[in-house]
Amino acid sequence: MIAHAVIRTRIEGLRVTHAGVELGPVTVSIGVATVPDHCSAERLVKTADAALYRAKVAGRNRIILATVRQDGGGRDGQQVA
């Protein structure tokens, strides 16, 4: 299993309770970027944050990998799970 799938599956398996009541399903949205594949070290957090934003816009329980846009206009996100 690919690492991002393992992370998402384990988070989905969490059971969270508060005051004795199970709160329901736990989901996660994650943006991923790596240096030097997606950006410089100086832009790493901004690039990962942009991918996270795209994951949230795409819907609940998503992992988006930052990619270099083909039009040369900067970074974009690619859904990986």
Image (cartoon, rainbow, N blue to C red):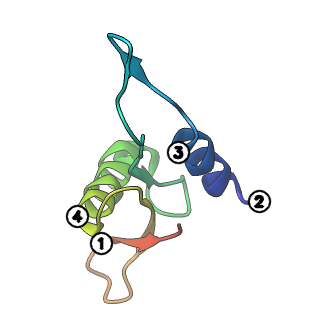
Residue placed most toward the observer, 14 or 67: 14
Q: Secondary structure at mark 2?
A: loop
Identify which residue is drawn at 55% across, 57% down: 36
Which of labels 3 and 4 is toward the front?
3
Q: Nearer the viewer, mark 2 or mark 1?
A: 2
Q: Is residue 32 left or right of residue 20?
A: right
Position of residue 5 measured from the top left corner of the image (x, y, whole percent) = 63, 56
Tell me, for residue 57, which label it has, or none: 4
The mark found on residue 74 in the picture is: 1
Tell me the amino acid under the disc marked 2: Met
Q: Which numbered dot is residue 12?
A: 3
43 left or right of 32 in image: left
Q: Nearer the observer, disc 2 or disc 3? A: 3
Marks 2 and 1, how far apart in space?
30 Å
Kind of residue indicated by mark 1: Gly
The structure residue drawn at horizontal position 60% and vertical position 45%, both measured from the top left corner, is: 7
Could you give the CA–CA distance between mark 2 and mark 3, rounded to whole angstroms? 15 Å
| Amino acid found under the numbered disc labelled 4 | Val
2 sits left or right of 15 in the view: right
Residues at marks 2 and 4 touching, judged by CB atoms closer than 8 Å: no
Q: Residue at x 53, y 67 (%)?
A: 81
Q: Which residue is mark 2?
A: 1
Q: Quadrant of residue 73?
A: bottom left
Earlier-in-chain disc, 2 versus 1 = 2
Mark 3: give few (<14), some (14-19) or many (20+) Cα within 10 Å: some
Of pointers 2 and 3, the one earlier in the residue sequence: 2
Q: Are there few (<14), some (14-19), or many (20+) residues within 10 Å of tag 4? A: few
The tag earlier along the polypeptide, 1 or 3, is 3
Circles 3 and 4: CB atoms closer than 8 Å: no
Mark 4 / mark 1, whichever is N-terminal: 4
Q: Is residue 29 above or below residue 77?
A: above
Give the number of marks: 4
